[in-house]
Image (cartoon, grey):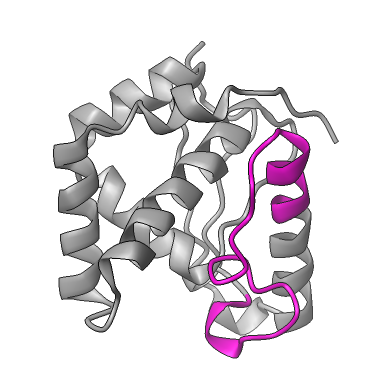
Amino acid sequence: MTTTQHDRTSVLSLISPALRADLITMVREDHWPEMTDDQGERGVDQLAAFLAVAARTTEKAAPSLRVDLFWHAAILHTKPYADFCDALGGFIHHVPDRDSAAHDPAEGRAAMRRTAEMIRAAGFVTDPEFWPVNGAADCTQSYAGCTDSPNSGRSK
């Protein structure tokens, strides 16, 4: 596994307070109405950590369902999302796999577990509410099998 360390504080600071608030509002309104402000703040932090790893790894990174909800909201903000990616070293493409019939839940959990390990190896903390590697059926694999695109079309 190839990952690069990032300074946690500098990565988190790449998301402005206004964008952070908008991402939390979007996720709450579109997918998770009972989400607290604290969960929203932590969700944005977990998204930032996931993207920091996805930008630098040579392996496919797969978000948990909850992290993917924030990723979907972030990519709708095209300019700040592109700026965030550029600050991390290149654009991070979102690659959905709509062939959900081919998804094996055990494989999804394993991919998410590997991604959580990469996040920790890069110096970030993984929040168990967002990376529930030991169960939590609603969060064990990404929505529609979404992943990043390692070394595929990234601009450096």
- As drawn, which residue projects farthest toward the front? 38
Count numbered badges in the picture.
Answer: 0
State the image quarter where residue 28 is shown.
bottom left
In the image: residue 139, left or right of residue 44? right
- As drawn, which residue projects farthest toward the right? 1
Please provide the residue range marked out in magenta: 115-140
State the image quarter where residue 63 is shown.
bottom right
The verdict on residue 24 being magenta is no
The residue under the point 62% across, 55% down is 62
- As drawn, which residue projects farthest toward the top? 156
| 130 versus 51 height, above or below | below
The residue under the point 23% across, 32% down is 16
| 15 versus 134 height, above or below | above
Provide residue 13's location: percent of width, then percent of height. Answer: 36, 27
Mainly helix, strand or loop, the magenta region? loop
In the image: residue 32, left or right of residue 96? left
| 18 versus 3 height, above or below | below
Image quarter where the N terminus lies is top right
The residue under the point 46% across, 22% down is 10
State the image quarter where residue 18 is shown.
top left
The residue under the point 73% across, 44% down is 120
Provide residue 146's location: percent of width, then percent of height. Answer: 52, 59
The verdict on residue 130 being magenta is yes
In the image: residue 144, left or right of residue 32? right
Instruction: Using the image as rendered, state which of residue 149 and residue 76 is in the foreground.
Output: 76
Instruction: Using the image as rendered, state which of residue 15 and residue 96 is in the foreground.
Output: 15
| 107 versus 11 height, above or below | below
